[in-house]
Image (spheres, grey):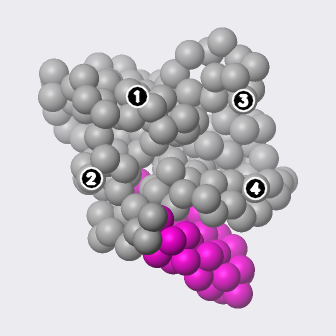
Amino acid sequence: VAIRRIVLLGEEILRVRGEEVTTFDSELNSLVQDMLETMYHAEGIGLAAPQIGVSLRVCVLDLGVKEGSEAGHWVLVNPMVAKTSKKTVKAPEGCLSIPEIEEVVTRFSKVTVSATDASGRPLEIEAEGLLARALQHEIDHLDGVLFIDQVSPLKRRLALRKWKKSQEESLDE
């Protein structure tokens, strides 16, 4: 089990649609363990494989203390949003690949996601609240979409400028 480097905004892999997983083996299990370890180390609630440089349709989530739930973690392979509510909600989001940037994003308030687990067993999640938001955010990553793509062009420009400045400052330290 290894903590992997989190890919940052500007790296091409974040903009590419991940490949479908077709082989459920020890290599996939190893990837999932690394993803969970990396997510916990970074104190995130979700992580998609492209965020650690792997172009596969795999994501992990653990809302942990944020939801006060003891549900443990989710491992989703080849997930897709099967159903959405008509109702949407706005809430702030951040991303481990764009540290220190938070923007208000509109998402469906409820979603049903179909996927398989790391063993290839099918699963379906009906989610609302933070879990629904996190699922949509992570599945977007698998399609090469980032949360800042979901805000107005002006807000996106300002956020990108702020992020660039924070990156330059961290290089100066």
* Residue at the image position 63 percent from the left and 29 percent from the top: 63
Label 4 close to label 3 by CB (< 8 Å): no
Q: Which mark sits nearer the N-terminus, 2 or 4? A: 2
Vertical placement of 124 versus 158: above or below? above
Q: Which mark sits nearer the N-terminus, 2 or 3? A: 2
Judge from the rendering whether residue 93 lies leftward or rightward of residue 97; answer left or right: right
Residue on which the image places disc 2: 53
Label 2 close to label 1 by CB (< 8 Å): no
Label 1 close to label 4 by CB (< 8 Å): no
Q: Amino acid under label 3?
A: Lys
Q: Which mark sits nearer the N-terminus, 4 or 3? A: 3
Q: Which mark sits nearer the N-terminus, 2 or 1? A: 1
Helix, strand or loop under label 3: helix
CA neighbours of label 3 inside 10 A, class few (<14), some (14 to 19), many (20+): few
Helix, strand or loop under label 1: helix
Q: Distance between the residues labelled 4 and 3?
A: 14 Å
Helix, strand or loop under label 4: strand
Residue on which the image places disc 4: 92
Q: Distance between the residues labelled 2 and 1?
A: 14 Å
Q: Distance between the residues labelled 1 and 4?
A: 23 Å
Which segment did they paint magenta? 142-170
Residue on which the image places disc 1: 36
* Residue at the image position 36 percent from the left and 40 percent from the top: 58
**Image quarter of the C terminus:** bottom left
| Magenta region includes residue 155 | yes
